[in-house]
Amino acid sequence: MSTTEGLTAPKKRSVFGVGISPVTAQSAVEITIAAAKCRQSFGVSALAVHGLMEAVRVPEAGAAVAKLHLVCCDGQPVRWALHLLHGVELPARVYGPDLMRALCARAAADGVGIYLFGSTEETCTKLVSALEKSYTSIRILGVQPDRFREATPEEDEADIAAMNASGAGLIFVGRGCPRQEMWTAAHLGKVDAAIVAIGAAFDFLSGNKPQAPSWMQKRGLEWLFRLVDEPGRLWKRYLITNSLYLFYLARALLTSKSSGA
């Protein structure tokens, strides 16, 4: 178990050299809310195949993910790899948008304030409206749309000060992978909250983008649904990352078999 200021998270298991936390959605919520309630600096990510392979390929991304306390299996293939390589049985993946919904529901029930960081101003406005409609007692204590560039040192200091002054226990970061994981890792110990890198959840929860039907999600085909929805933006990502995933998984299984593990 890894510990931070009295909080515990299960020991990560290596998937292609990237540490993945063997947690269910319920345990991920419990651990994260525990950090949020006492405003401990705690890093969380829900990692799909794209994020996993970015952490494998890009040293800065891999180093950032390694610093996070909780790295959940967002993608079904990540969950499958955890099972095939380590025998870990998880009932389902920890889907980022559903994790955000569950965290918002608990935050509303427990009086934990939240802060939104990322995406466009329009998306943030729609997201605030959607969250307030779904969770009537939710306390949204701050919103900072993405600048779509790295902040200057002065801007970064102002962002940190605003987040800490807000009193929010949960910071949701929707800046795209791996930028959000790198930002989260860089701000551990600076932002007094549980920081959750949540990817496309801002777009899904705000209604900007449709979600794949559940039968596609369960079969690991969400990538295909998103590819059909946004072929121009996503075809290269999925061609590269899905192919790399299959290569790394096959290599890891062959290595494990040859070593008798």
Image (cartoon, rainbow, N blue to C red):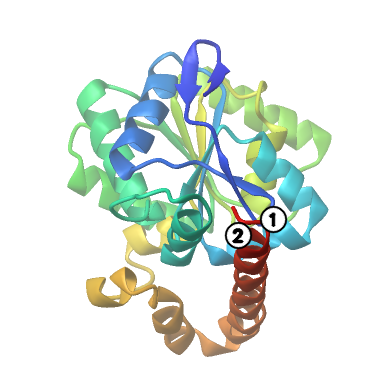
Q: How far separated are the C-alphas under marks 2 and 1?
A: 6 Å
Q: Nearer the viewer, residue 258 or 101?
A: 258
Q: Which residue is mark 2?
A: 51
Q: Is there a contact, CB below 8 Å, between mark 2 and mark 1?
A: yes
Q: Position of residue 243 (x, y in %)?
A: 63, 80
Q: Which mark is residue 249?
A: none
Residue farthest front in this picture: 260
Element type at marker 2? helix
Q: Which residue is mark 1?
A: 55
Q: Position of residue 79 (x, y in %)?
A: 44, 57
- Image height check: is 35 above or below 74? above
- Image height check: is 46 above or below 140? below
Q: Position of residue 188 (x, y in %)?
A: 65, 27
Q: Nearer the viewer, residue 59 or 120?
A: 59
Q: Is residue 13 visible?
A: yes
Q: Amino acid at mark 2?
A: Gly
Residue 26 falls in image quadrant: top left
- Image height check: is 54 above or below 43? below
